[in-house]
Amino acid sequence: MKRWTLWLAVGLLVAAAPALKATEVLGGGYGGYYLGAVFPGLQDLNDHLKPLGLDLNPPMFCQGGGGFGYGGAILMGGFGYGGSLTAEHGGRRVELAGGGGAFEMGRIWAVGPVRLALTGLLGGYGYTLSLKPDLPDADFDSLLVHPERMARLTTGGVMVGVGTLVFVPLTSFLALGLHATLAYVPFGEWQLEDGAEVHGAPSLLRWHPTLQVTVLFGGEGRKRAQDNGS
């Protein structure tokens, strides 16, 4: 299934929620552990790596955490995640490590035991690309003369996007769910650790989807039945 069809299905489900016989949640809050994957676009980067026998294969598995609170129809919260990908071949090693975090705010609905939220998000991201040859141990004095052992490039900036949160309270304090985001990342230039820019470096795709399983702890307040259209 193409990614856009998945997002369309989720969006239609959330948009249809108010038309269903639902319950209004007067208030609640959860926080916990997020485990999943981010899908950075690495085609341009891999085009440079493959002639050397290296290939970074997404998705990038990531872990992190988040939390949110809601009252009536409004939900506010935040989340963060991080992960890495590595590849080795022919005495060379490349690693891409990174992550992001954002504040999110939106609307939440309750349909039976399921809670559905559609949010907008604003935050930031960062990536580090490390290129390391397979070198032996070094003498300290030799490092003073020839300190070059590896190259580390960094990039980062602001990201904006939309998110969908679906969760089910299992007990009075435990809930399980899914958290998906689609963020627009205006990709910046790669820089070395000393601040010098790297010309001709590959770029990452500007759209970064994520999908994470959430294990949440918290609870919610009283509910009252509501039948839309009555």
Image (cartoon, rainbow, N blue to C red):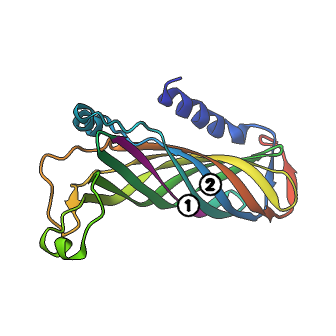
For the magenta stretch, what is the residue range? 76-88
The residue positioned farthest toward the top in the image shown: 1
Q: How far apart are marks 2 and 1 (CA)?
A: 9 Å
Q: Can residue 166 be seen in this view?
A: no
Instruction: Name the quadrant containing residue 53.
Output: top left
Res. 34 mark: 2
Name the spot of residue 22 as percent of width and height, x first: 80, 44
Identify which residue is drawn at 56% across, 59% down: 105
Depth check, front residue: 68 or 75: 68
Mark 2 vs mark 1: give the one in front: 2
Is 34 left or right of 42, judged from the image as shown? right
Quadrant for the C terminus, please. Answer: top right
What residue is at 59 percent from the left and 30 percent from the top? 9
Tell me, for residue 65, which label it has, or none. Answer: none
Q: Which of 142 and 96 is in front in this view?
A: 142
Predominant SS of the magenta segment: strand
Task: Name the kind of residue labelled 1 in the image.
Answer: Phe
Residue 89 visible in the snapshot: yes
Residue 11 image offset from top left, x and y in percent: 58, 37
Ranked by sequence position, the earlier of labels 2 and 1 is 2
Q: Element under label 2? A: strand
Q: Name the residue under label 1.
A: 79
**Residue 91, position as x, y percentages in the image:** 29, 44
Amino acid bearing label 2 = Tyr
Left or right, 144 with respect to 130, comes to left
Q: Do the residues labelled 2 and 1 touch (CB within 8 Å)?
A: yes
